[in-house]
Amino acid sequence: MFHLTRRRNLKSIFENGLKPQGDIFGGFKRARSSVQHAVYLFETEHEARMGGSTQFMREKDPDEWHIIEVEVPDYCDLRRDPEFGLQRRINAWMAYCTIPPEYLTYLYPVRDEE
C-alpha cells in the first residue's frame, strides 16, 4: 500500500508511525459524507498519484507531497474507502490502526518520479 503526505509530516511519521486521522485525508480538501479516523492508503503507487493529482497541480512547491510505502500490519482493520473509490474508481483504503515506523519505507517526493 502507499500513503501520501505533506513534507511537514515526514519527521513525525517516521518517529511515531502513521496514526489514524480525521482531518479530511491528511491535508486533502475533498468532500466526504463522513470523515473517518483512519490512515488513508492507496493500493498502488499509480493510484496514489491519481488520487492526489488535483492537490499536486495546486502546489507551488513541487516537493510538497511525498509517497511512503506501507506494509499494513496483520492486526490492522483495513477497509475499502467507498467514497473515494466511487468518485474516481481508485483503490483507496482506510486502515483503523497506528502503523509503526518499521512498517514504513520512504520513497520520494511525488514530482521526482512524474
Image (cartoon, rainbow, N blue to C red):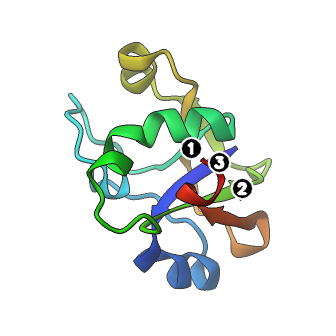
Task: Report the quarter where the N terminus lies.
Answer: top right
Q: Is residue 77 left or right of residue 30?
A: right
**Upstream in the sequence, badge 3 or badge 1?**
3
Q: Residues within 10 Å of mark 3 (few under 14, many from 20)?
A: many
80 or 49, which is in the foreground? 49
Above or below, 46 against 58 in this view is: above
Q: Position of residue 7 (x, y in %)?
A: 46, 74
- Marks 2 and 3 in Cβ contact (< 8 Å): yes
Q: Residue at x 51, y 82 (%)?
A: 12
Q: Position of residue 53 (x, y in %)?
A: 41, 39
Secondary structure state at the residue bearing disc 3: strand
Q: Residue at x 54, y 85 (%)?
A: 11
Mark number, residue 41: 1
Q: Position of residue 83 (x, y in %)?
A: 36, 22
Q: Return the residue at label 2.
A: 69
Q: How many angstroms separate mark 2 from mark 3 (CA)?
A: 5 Å
Q: Return the residue at label 3.
A: 2
Amino acid at circle 1? Leu
Q: Is residue 10 left or right of residue 59?
A: right
Secondary structure state at the residue bearing disc 1: strand
**Upstream in the sequence, badge 1 or badge 2?**
1
Amino acid at circle 2? Glu
